[in-house]
């Protein structure tokens, strides 16, 4: 049998199995909804307000000061600057629950578009 003839005729010998991602997308959708609701609930608590003020806000200030001090040195340590910048990015991301909620919200919107297409309006 001439395999080139089969290929030319459009006949497929091996077909990739089709994977339905809807199950995984729905699971991620449910997880994101729970995370967003949890963030909204936590943001309203006095405990979060205390943590934000006492831990995260001071951490952001400290890290910013360390980065600036390292940058002003005659021979700054680039690895240290990068490490501090990564820590600062993490601290800023998790110190503002509204921003974190938005990150998860964007992902949720994308999943809903994939699942529901044009039926979803945001």
Image (cartoon, rainbow, N blue to C red):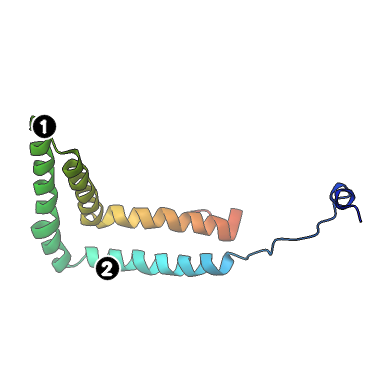
Q: Which of the two residues, 87 or 55, is positioned nearer the viewer here?
A: 87
Please give the name of the residue rendered at 67% of the width and 63% of the height, measured from the top-left corner.
18
| Residue 87 in the image, given as x and y percentages of width and height | 20, 51
The quadrant of the rendering that contains the N terminus is bottom right
Neighbours of disc 1 within 10 Å: few (<14), some (14-19), many (20+): few
Q: Is residue 59 above or below residue 35?
A: above
Report if the CB atoms under discs 2 and 1 are less than 8 Å apart. no
Q: Secondary structure at mark 2?
A: helix
Q: Residue extending furthest top?
A: 74
Q: Which residue is mark 1?
A: 75
Q: Residue at x 13, y 40 (%)?
A: 67
Front disc: 2 or 1: 1
Residue at figure coordinates x 21%, y 65% from the top left: 44
The disc, 2 or 1, on the residue closer to the chain's N-terminal end is 2
Q: Residue 45's spot in the image, x, y percent?
A: 18, 67
Q: Residue at x 62, y 66 (%)?
A: 20
Q: Is residue 7 left or right of residue 83?
A: right
Give the label on residue 118, or none.
none
Give the percent coordinates (x, y) of residue 50: 11, 63
Q: Residue furthest right?
A: 1
Residue under label 2, please give it: 41
Under tag 1, what secondary structure?
A: loop
Query: Residue 105 sits in which quadrant?
Result: bottom left
Give the image location of residue 39, x and y in percent. 29, 64
User: For the residues marked 2 and 1, what is the alpha-carbon distance in whole angstroms?
Assistant: 46 Å
Pick the front one: 55 or 86 = 86
Callout 2 environment at 10 Å: few (<14), some (14 to 19), or many (20+)? few
Q: Is residue 6 visible?
A: yes
Query: What count of labels does the image hold?
Result: 2
Left or right relative to 51: residue 34: right
The residue at the far front in this view is 1
Q: Is residue 108 left or right of residue 103?
A: right
């Amino acid at each position: 049998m001439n395999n080139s003839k089969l290929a030319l005729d459009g006949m497929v010998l091996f077909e990739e199995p089709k994977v339905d991602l809807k199950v995984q997308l729905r699971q991620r959708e449910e997880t994101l909804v729970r995370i967003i609701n949890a963030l909204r609930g936590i943001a309203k608590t006095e405990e979060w307000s205390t943590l934000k003020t006492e831990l995260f806000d001071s951490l952001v200030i400290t890290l910013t000061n360390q980065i600036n001090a390292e940058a002003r040195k005659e021979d700054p340590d680039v690895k240290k600057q990068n490490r501090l910048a990564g820590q600062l990015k993490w601290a800023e991301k998790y110190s503002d629950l509204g921003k974190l909620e938005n990150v998860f919200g964007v992902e949720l919107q994308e999943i809903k578009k994939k699942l529901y297409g044009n039926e979803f309006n945001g």
